[in-house]
Amino acid sequence: MWIGRERRTGSGGNSGGTFLDGQMLVAMPGMRDERFARAVIYLCAHSAEGAMGIIVNQPANHINFTDLLVQLDVIPQDERISLPHSAEGVKVLRGGPVETGRGFVLHSADFFIQDSTLPIDDGICLTATLDILKAIATGGGPASAVLALGYAGWAPGQLENEIQQNGWLHCPADRGLVFDAEAGAKYDLALRKIGIDPGMLSSDAGHA
């Protein structure tokens, strides 16, 4: 099964500004880990216990959302053509290197499942159960959603250390950046949101 059924818990807010859940991480050009080169990550949880986020600008090439619904027995093969238009538009992403066989749906806050959906910030939620896929397939899902395979995770203090070493920039979340922008444009858009001209950044400007 690709979609987990247990809820992940996070710090549930910005905890006086100490933690960054609900914000965007943007990789510096000198990121040495190729898995995160030019990555834009939406942080779903950040606390003293560590951090968890979803990379939102790495498409899962050759993986189609409709095909996944069939593989997971959410819909039978013969119902592919009757899916609502909103389901056909859901993008599939490579969310990170951890648990790549598991799916996580980032979505707008107009959809909520008690004890399964994690509200994060700025009208964005995370759900990691098959129920949301069934809702999307029948036209009852959220207005905006992306499905990520896997996630990015950090041990306690690890993310803070990487930020101090200039591995990451961060900025407030932008729903348009998460759900609407083309994947290939998100990195430069995120830098401009921070106030940085992408052309002015050197590849030696930081390291992870």
Image: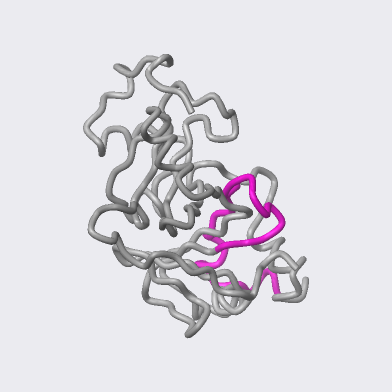
Residue 134 to residue 155: above or below: below
Residue 29 to residue 51: above or below: above
Residue at 48% over, 47% down: 56
Residue 171 to residue 180: above or below: above
Q: Nearer the viewer, residue 55 or 70?
A: 55
Residue at 44% over, 41% down: 40
Whole-percent x and y of residue 20? Answer: 34, 52
Whole-percent x and y of residue 60? Answer: 63, 46
Q: Nearer the viewer, residue 115 or 189?
A: 115
Report if residue 103 lies within the magenta region. Answer: yes
Whole-percent x and y of residue 133? Answer: 60, 73
| Snapshot quadrant of residue 81 | bottom right
| Snapshot quadrant of residue 122 | bottom left
Q: Is residue 190 left or right of residue 90?
A: left
Span of residues in magenta: 79-104
Q: Is residue 57 left or right of residue 171?
A: right
Q: Is residue 172 left or right of residue 152?
A: left
Q: Is residue 60 left or right of residue 156?
A: right
Residue 145 to residue 149: above or below: below
Residue that sits furthest to the bottom in the current view: 114
Rendering colour mode: one colour
The quadrant in which the N terminus is found is bottom right
Report if residue 82 lies within the magenta region. Answer: yes
Residue at 68% over, 52% down: 100
